[in-house]
């Protein structure tokens, strides 16, 4: 509430009744809007307003016109920003009444059943903690945008209805009405499109991109997440890492956090495994953990491939579109020493969480082809699924690379939240259903017919 500096002035306030305290001759209303609370004092001196105040209940929506007054000394509340003032109302208008809230919203809400919280997410979000989280998310994205625009990046959107792209997860698919029996896939990331934008000559791209992955849900994983996704042409590994480091430092420092060590320490994957036993380590001391300290570190030189257990087959550890380290390209092209080939992948770790990752890409078609061959694609399969990339790489593709940051992972780290749902406005439940609305749900016979789909009788509820 910006009224604390307006003593003596008349103000018009819109908001919710956070609390009503009836002291007989005097009724206090705490009026809440997105900026905070203001105490409004009703006395029988103004009978009409007093009558209305008497009717008010929690979460009713009101408009109040009144004068900002200094509170008497003994009424000052040092715990809230507007604790020194109160509003003496001349007008009050009820804009809407409210049923009783389905659960308390004046606490942090962790103990309330998730299904219930998400069913009524629009009121769950009114709680102070979630208001703060969602505002911080907006601030984070805003500062990222400012940094990237200042550094000559273009914000470019890429399609949601698309073809499958391998990021190591299952795709969500959408049936096509106009192409019977054919399906779109929702993007697991804009990986291929952002590379195509480099080939298209834009040189510096970014997007706050929605990504869809049909994977088993965990605390830090939902079906949908958002990435700060960027890509640059004519860069080496160090260039992307430096740009990204400057971005993250500027953004989080502007948000009031301290960074433990700059430049961020860099570990090879092997060093990290030897030193910490994992590649998502936490460099904070106990003291750091009590302050707003973020311990960033880079991990690089990951193995490009790993064996699928028991299958005598290889898969990529991070991103099939990456370039191998220069000294290992010969091995990659020859399909030799596969376990020793290192990739140009770099991951950003913060406080024990992987908060970003990217690589320099294969910008020559034979390199990309060799990757797919190692992971078991026949030539015809590569042509079928990635022919467009091979073609594009042969039409003047510049060397390029990039990185992506999970917005939710970053926010969870900044806020110390354990669950993804605490930093998304409308997350899925842990059983994979939407907040508020009823999805996934049935299609009508008519819709199924239009989409050329049939649902097995045994699958129906
Ligand atoms: N597309 C990658 C991912 O989603 C990130 C990148 O390499 O830029 O993990």
Image (cartoon, rainbow, N blue to C red):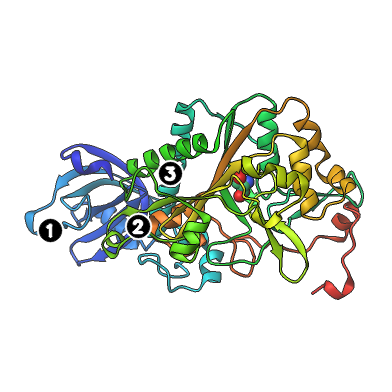
Question: Tag 2, which secondary structure?
Answer: strand
Of the pair 128 and 145, the residue shown nearer to us:
145
Q: Look at 58% across and 39% down and name the residue there.
A: 402
Q: Which residue is mark 1?
A: 75
Instruction: Report how far apart the C-alphas of labels 3 and 2 lie in the structure.
Output: 30 Å
Q: Earlier in the sequence, mark 1 or mark 3?
A: 1
Question: Tag 3, which secondary structure?
Answer: helix
Question: In the picture, residue 322 is in which quadrant?
Answer: top right
Label 1: how many Cα within 10 Å (few below 14, some 14–19, many 20+): few
Q: Given this view, does label 3 or label 2 mark the residue nearer the observer?
A: 3
Q: Is mark 3 within 8 Å of ligand 1?
A: no
Q: Earlier in the sequence, mark 3 or mark 2?
A: 2
Q: Look at 86% across and 42% down and name the residue there.
A: 383
Residue 158 seen in render: no
Q: Is residue 194 left or right of residue 270?
A: right
Residue 193, above or below 449? above
Point out the residue furthest to the left here.
Answer: 73
Q: Which residue is mark 3?
A: 140
Q: Earlier in the sequence, mark 2 or mark 1?
A: 2
Q: Which of the numbered marks, if any, corresponds to residue 17?
A: 2
Residue 78 seen in render: yes
């Amino acid at each position: 509430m910006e009224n604390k500096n307006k003593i003596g002035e008349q103000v018009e306030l819109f908001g919710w009744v956070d609390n009503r305290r009836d002291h007989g001759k005097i009724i206090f209303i705490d009026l809440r809007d997105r900026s905070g609370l203001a105490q409004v004092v009703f006395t029988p001196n103004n009978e009409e307003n007093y009558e209305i105040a008497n009717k008010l209940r929690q979460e009713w929506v009101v408009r109040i016109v009144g004068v900002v007054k200094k509170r008497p000394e003994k009424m000052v509340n040092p715990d809230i920003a507007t604790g020194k003032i109160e509003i003496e109302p001349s007008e009050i208008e009820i804009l809407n009444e409210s049923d009783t809230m389905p659960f308390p919203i004046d606490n942090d809400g962790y103990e309330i059943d998730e299904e219930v919280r998400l069913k009524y997410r629009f009121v769950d979000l009114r709680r102070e903690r979630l208001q703060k989280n969602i505002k911080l998310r907006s601030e984070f994205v805003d500062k990222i945008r400012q940094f990237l625009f200042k550094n000559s990046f273009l914000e470019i959107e890429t399609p949601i209805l698309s073809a499958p792209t391998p990021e190591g997860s299952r795709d969500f698919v959408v049936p096509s009405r106009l192409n019977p029996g054919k399906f779109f896939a929702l993007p697991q990331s804009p990986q291929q499109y952002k590379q195509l934008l480099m080939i298209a000559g834009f040189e510096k791209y970014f997007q706050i991109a929605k990504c869809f992955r049909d994977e088993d849900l965990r605390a830090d994983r939902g079906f949908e997440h958002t990435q700060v996704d960027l890509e640059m042409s004519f860069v080496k590994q160090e260039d992307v890492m430096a740009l990204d480091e400057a971005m993250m430092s500027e953004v989080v420092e502007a948000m009031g956090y301290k960074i433990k060590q700059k430049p961020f320490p860099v570990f090879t994957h092997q060093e990290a495994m030897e030193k910490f036993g994992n590649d998502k380590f936490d460099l904070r001391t106990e003291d750091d953990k009590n302050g707003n300290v973020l311990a960033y570190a880079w991990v690089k030189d990951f193995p490009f491939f790993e064996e699928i257990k028991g299958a005598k087959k290889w898969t990529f550890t991070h991103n099939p579109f990456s370039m191998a380290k220069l000294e290992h390209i010969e091995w990659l092209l020859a399909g030799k020493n596969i376990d020793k080939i290192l990739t140009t992948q770099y991951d950003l770790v913060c406080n024990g969480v992987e908060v970003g990752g990217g690589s320099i890409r294969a910008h020559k078609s034979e390199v990309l082809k060799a990757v797919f061959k190692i992971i078991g694609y026949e030539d015809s399969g590569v042509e079928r699924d990635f022919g467009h990339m091979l073609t594009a790489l042969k039409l003047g593709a510049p060397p390029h690379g990039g990185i992506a940051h999970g917005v939710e992972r970053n926010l969870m780290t900044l806020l110390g939240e354990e669950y993804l749902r605490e930093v998304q406005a409308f997350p899925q439940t842990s059983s994979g259903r939407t907040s508020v609305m009823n999805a996934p749900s049935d299609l009508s016979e008519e819709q199924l017919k239009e989409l050329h789909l049939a649902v097995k009788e045994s699958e129906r509820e």
